[in-house]
Amino acid sequence: MEHEFNLLPPDTSGLLSSMTGLYHSPNSTENLVSTDPLFNFSLHEAIEILKEHQRTEKVLVPDTEIVIIIVYSVLMTSGVVSNALVCFVVARQCARKHHQAGPSPRNMYIVNLAVADLALCLVCMPFTLVSLLKRRWTLGLTLCKLVPALQGANIMVSAGTITAIALDRYFTIVQTPRGGVCRTARCSVASTIVLIWSLSFLSMVPLLIYQEVETVRLGGLVVYEACLERWPSRAAQAGYTLAISVAQFAFPVLVLSTIHARISSYLRLHLSSPPVDSSCKRARREWRRNRRTMMILSCIAIVFALSWLPMTAFNLLIEFQPGLLTPPRTLYLVFALCHIMAMSTAVTNPLMYGWLNTNFRREFRFLGGSDKSSEKKRRAANRNRRISAPQSIVIRHDRRTSMTCFTTITSSNTTRPSTTLTLLPHSSVDNL
């Protein structure tokens, strides 16, 4: 779509004032034309002023631009490296465990999250950085439609995967699946991942339809091109923005907060204090593991909420109160800060779901060669303990509580009384 204006004094003055004020509204380019006569330029003078404006046009001061470039570069580099490392570790785990066909169900979610975060680093951040620096669109109509849709879809996939991981942990810890459910877990996770990607791309279809490149001309001179949303009505655009904000932020935060609170309550109920008996070493380890799990779950919910709250609030503010951030420098600077906080999840996610994961951290050490000797020693110690242990362990499963009870039966030549320990399922928290 093109807007061509005659260089009559009223129109020219309105365009110049809007160019030096709010460059363009996210909603429409209609703000670019005003009928308030502020200047009286001739055609030649107006064209010369616009050419000079094109050469020297800057929204952010050079020092601010340098800082933003450095921050985005650090985020993109660290995000690509950390998420690629997570995918590599999962692939290596599968290669080491020959009996396991493919990654475990929980690792499938983590890999999916890493892929979505990789896309954030490779699609969202570079194009957003270019838009912040150039303040105009130069990549044509096709990319104008595809880039925003891909950016939004990857953000939705990331939020949806985090929500699915929270639900998976809830059912694993609080409602441990049994029998056939365990055997079909990998298929169920794969179906969930396909559903997340499908719904994410489906939610971005309106952007493919209503995203347009608008060209503003003065005579034969192209003033600028902008990639904007052109909705049929203001109400439709506001409704879409609100729906995306709920699906991308409000719903995941609600699920994370509720699920993690219930998991923490469940863990606190069953293991409220560490055992003091010296014979309960495993119970003490389990208690420490569960305490650590509660801390990780709380951090995950808090980090997600704090990272995406500014960006969501900014989008809603621009949609419903666009006049509050009218100076372009303020608008672009606030957007850059909010977007940087949101994109930081591409770095924090592999840390929380990868490095804080006990199995992942052990694999990282194994890759570095520092854990190979300790792994051999641990296996040898386990074999010796099984051979020389003066006791046997009877394991029974309580289906009413979905918990495993370990009853220690002492040998005949010892006088120590038998001990019954009630522990949570070991696999439920070992991969958190």
Image: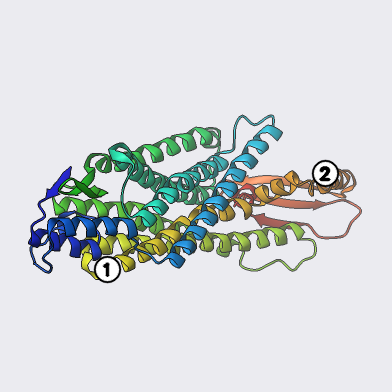
Q: Which mark is residue 379?
A: 2
Placement of 50 over or under 188, stated as above or below: below
Name the residue nearer the viewer: 152 or 182.
Answer: 152
* Residue sitting at x 56%, y 64%: 269
Q: How is the image coloured?
A: rainbow
User: How far from the left and from the top, in percent, is residue 85?
Assistant: 62, 45
Q: How crowded is mark 1: few (under 14 residues within 10 Å), some or many (20 or more)?
A: some
Q: Quickly name the residue at label 1.
A: 325
Name the residue nearer the viewer: 48 or 32.
Answer: 48
User: How far from the left and from the top, in percent, is residue 295?
Assistant: 57, 64
Q: Which mark is residue 351?
A: none
User: How far from the left and from the top, in percent, is residue 335?
Assistant: 36, 62
Instruction: Locate residue 35 relative to residue 63 in the image: left or right.
Output: left
Q: Quadrant of residue 323?
A: bottom left
Q: Which amino acid does label 1 sit on?
A: Leu
User: How far from the left and from the top, in percent, is residue 161?
Assistant: 45, 46
* Residue sitting at x 29%, y 55%: 54
